[in-house]
Amino acid sequence: MTLKTKKGMLSAIAVCAAIVLTATGCSSPANDGGTSPAPGGEAPAGSNEITIGVLATAEGNLAFGMDEAKAAIGVAMAAYGGDVDGAMIGDTKVNLVYEGTDGTSATAQTKAKKLVENTGVDVMFGPVSGDEGETIVQYALTVPDVTFVNGSASPVSMTLEGAENFFRFHGDSAMWMGGLGDYAFKDKGYKKIYSIAEDYSFPYDNAGGFFSEFCAAGGEVNGNSWVPVGTTDYATIIAQIPADTDAVYVGLGGADAASFLAQAVTAGINKPLVGGSIAVDTTALSGDSNIAAAAVGTITGGPVPGADFSTPTWDTFVADYAKQPNAFPSPSIFAVLYYNSFAPLLQAIEASKGDLSDNQAALRAALSATDWASPTGQITMDANRQAIVDNFLTEVVEGDGGALTTKNINEATGVKQGTVVYQRFDGCPGS
Amino acid sequence: MEQFLLVTLNGLTLAAVYFLVASGLTLIFGLMRVITLAHGTSYLLGGYIGYVIVRETGNWALGALGAALAVGLLGLVIHQLLIRKFQDDDMRVALITLGVALIGTDLMLATFGGTATQVAFPAALQIGVNVPGVGQYPLIRLMILGISIVVGILLSLFINRTRFGSIVRAGVDDSQMTAATGVNVRIVFGAIFFLGSALAGFAGVVGGTLFPLLPGQDGTYLLFSLVVVIVGGMGSIPGAAIGAVLVGLVSQYTLVIAPTYALVVTFALMVVVLAIRPQGIMGRAV
Amino acid sequence: MTRLATPTRSEKSRGWLRPGLIIGLIVLALAIAFPHLVDRPKFWIPNIGIKSLWLGIVAMSLVFLNRYVGLLSLAQMTIAGMSAYGVAYATVTLGLSPWVSIVFGLMIGTLAGYLVALVAARTKAIYFLMLTLALGQVFYSWAAQAVDVTNASRGLYPVPRPDLGVMNLADLNSFYYFALAAAVLCYLLCRYVATSSFGLALQGIRDSPERMSALGYNVNRYRVGAITFASFIASIGGVIVVFDRNQVDPSVVNLNATLDILIVAVIGGIGSLLGVFAGGVVLSLLLNFSQDFTDRYMTLTGLVFIAVLLFAPAGLAGIGKQVQGVKDRVLRKKKSAPVLEPVQEPPTKPSEEELTTEGTQR
């Protein structure tokens, strides 16, 4: 019996060695197992069919991302007489394939690989979250023959990685605070601000963008609380806010922001608030928590204008958005960013006549040349394929019937990307 | 000093919620020697049910009661359908309840969405009251502390003073002997599963009043209740209280000293307790 | 001590050896040919092949602990994640060479497993489950916060697949065979340890710690040794994870990842060291394709998971045997060992027999 086992093991070890030998033999560049092109992945010049793979969140806390992405794409495609599944752009047939993620980088990697290698898409569009975005840029570097257009991921670093095939048509999270630091210091007269923010990359960039401008204007940061994401009990954090602070910066999002605001009411905070870009967005304000007393008067910055904003292009977009299935009462930040990113892609396909030859050079040139009056202002591209955009400063106000809404207070035009990728900081960033 | 007292009070009120969740878990384990990993799911479901009832009726107490009843019944059904057969196989019960948790989490996400909600409570109660030595303190947190203490006392009385309680205690000591004395252990098990789940559902409404309800909270509360019962000793109600207070206080103190590592330090507490006393503070050596 | 049921072995198990071995070899041959059989290798190799292999390796460490020590650990993915973080830290932050990084990662994972073992070995089975679950979350929250070491949620990147000299892992096929070889080696190692005197003592301890203690065995030390060994296996999986993903971030060790490993082990058959790879294939197929026919991936997974636990506790690996069991019962119309019951094996059961039947469970 024992002998038999030993014999089995010997043969198994031999098999194992054989595997290694086969493998080393396979290392020769002639046979790398990946040269066979996926159908549609390498379309010949003049081909008039383009497949776009869309990544959006369909599970987890951002599960509504997919609906918002489809609503945005639906609006953009309707302009060409198509729908979320496809359209004819000039002579080019555009097909769309969707993959849902759960907002983590692991799933984004899996699904992106599936779209590129299995479905054989020509263009990748997405993703939603910052964690996904950073990993997708890394992936983009490994597949130079596919063009990537970002969805709503906003880490600063993404367009600084040197991925020639990666385009972002909206501001990064530091740019979303563009103009707010000056406004807080000069117009609101805040000299000292206490910062409460979640401890991860988005708030680093977001708060970094705000405080670098605020500090440059002459403001002072009199304390930082970096709290873990998912912190729901803010009683102790609130107790640490110094009495002489002029305002509190709330770099929280989603449930954390709602918790903070609700608890700020019962704890009797009477300081004005400065919100990070996702602290007082529509999803937070439309929740059931009683946050009015804390939220009203909060100023914030971001790519989405206040509810009273009205230009012809914006109004048209909002009206078209409302016709889409599963639309929110007003477009969320994700719908706005996905639309602002997808429309230029369609325009570029139209301009380049669907020509994907020479590593999609014509398409990429057209994307880089984008100069478009979007619903939220003019969008042009810089040398890093990062958009130069307008940014909005808004204030939370009580609307009709006591519901919370936002009011446009200022607009920063032509906001450009900085070159700083922010890390966790104490006091002013970089100090 | 004022800050220290304030943070202590925060820790105690947080512990109140932890205790409510963990008491159900420890009760089930105490009698049945099985651990239900769907306990966090019961918490979140209770919170959502309470949220819906309160939104429709405007009555918080009704919401809490309805949630407890509904989640308790669901727990009973799950026990009868999936767990009863494998009662002696603690590992398999743990895994089956884990499967239930996976499904429950997903269905709740589909039903209630990924954004946060909170159980509403009367605006008249959203005020601060003056606590000596602390200053203004949210009334709602004090009320939750009170509710939790009352529930704890009721549970203790129930276990120590009633006939059913004595059966439960006997069952904890030796379920086979108890069955031999003519007690229908099967009914007792079902009742305990109902009660344990109902407590989690009730805790969901209480916790959902103070903190947001959203996907992910089920996992968080499952973990915290596991930590609480491991620290306090499995199967002991006073142990759950002690564990909850320790976890609540430690998490709030570290939130002041080293906010980034609040969670890590809280879990480290559990490791320390286990290293010194593997059965937990109030647990009996097994 | 109760533990998850492993399939009861039929008396005729010796006769199964040959077909079992043949099936095993066929599967191995298929695994070797796999990169050349699929139409889109750049998708199938990483997304299904390599993913199944590392899921299987990590799950194998879980199965080893469950089968030979009677402990169900939910920290195996965490250990693998630590090893992955070790490799990434050595590569990205310290700038060490690939070989050194790999060794560093393996050491980190194994050492972490040893430390977990020191705390956890004294606890009873169900406590061990809860403790490892909680420890996994400690590491997750630490990894998500410790900017200085783990770069928090951004994670550590890039970790390119290295050229190891004998093997250039940058080549996808080579990397696949590297993972396959690692999987085979892990399996052989697990079997070897299980048949050694150490493994026999472990099984004795699993079945009757008191008796083994009375016989003079240091029960704790054996358990610590076994958990450490399983951590080493999981760490090997972690090395493949980090090269597969070219980066490591907290999502490698989050609760879902932890549960994935458990699901793989349960679907594959929690008593079978080889069934895990079947489980790995099932899960990676589900992850990639379930969206084509349902939006509720987690519900589907949960249902499959519960169904396996209720009706086929020996998992895919045991289905053949289970069918055989039913057939036997029908044919002989006489009481045969029901597969659904938890098994209490006598400590004296010779383990060689267990091993020779191993192949038949595929």
Image (tube, grey):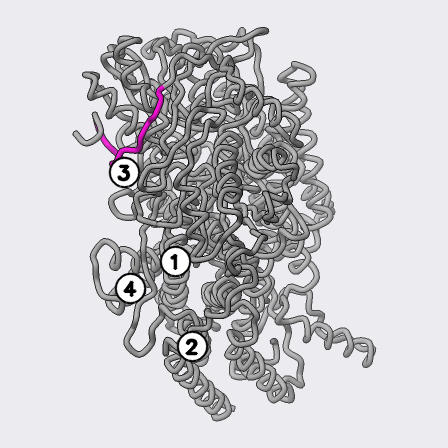
Residue drawn at (40%, 45%) of the image:
A365
Amino acid marked by disc 1: Thr
Residue of label 3: A421
Query: Where does residue A23 sit, x and y in percent of width and height?
Result: 41, 79
Image mark 2: chain:
A
Amino acid marked by disc 4: Met
Does the magenta portion include A351?
no
Q: Which residues are drawn in magenta? A: A412-426
Query: A418 or B90: which is nearer to us?
Result: A418
- Disc nearer the start of the sequence (2/3): 2
On residue A142, the disc is 1
Query: C139 or C42: which is nearer to us?
Result: C42
Residue of label 2: A31
Q: Is residue A184 left or right of residue A126?
A: left
Residue of label 4: C107
**4 or 2: mark nearer the eye:** 2
Amino acid marked by disc 3: Val
Labels 1, 3: one chain: yes
Query: Where does residue A250 sit, x and y in percent of width and height?
Result: 36, 22
Mark 4 vs mark 2, CA separation in Å: 34 Å
In terms of image quadrants, where is residue A209?
top left
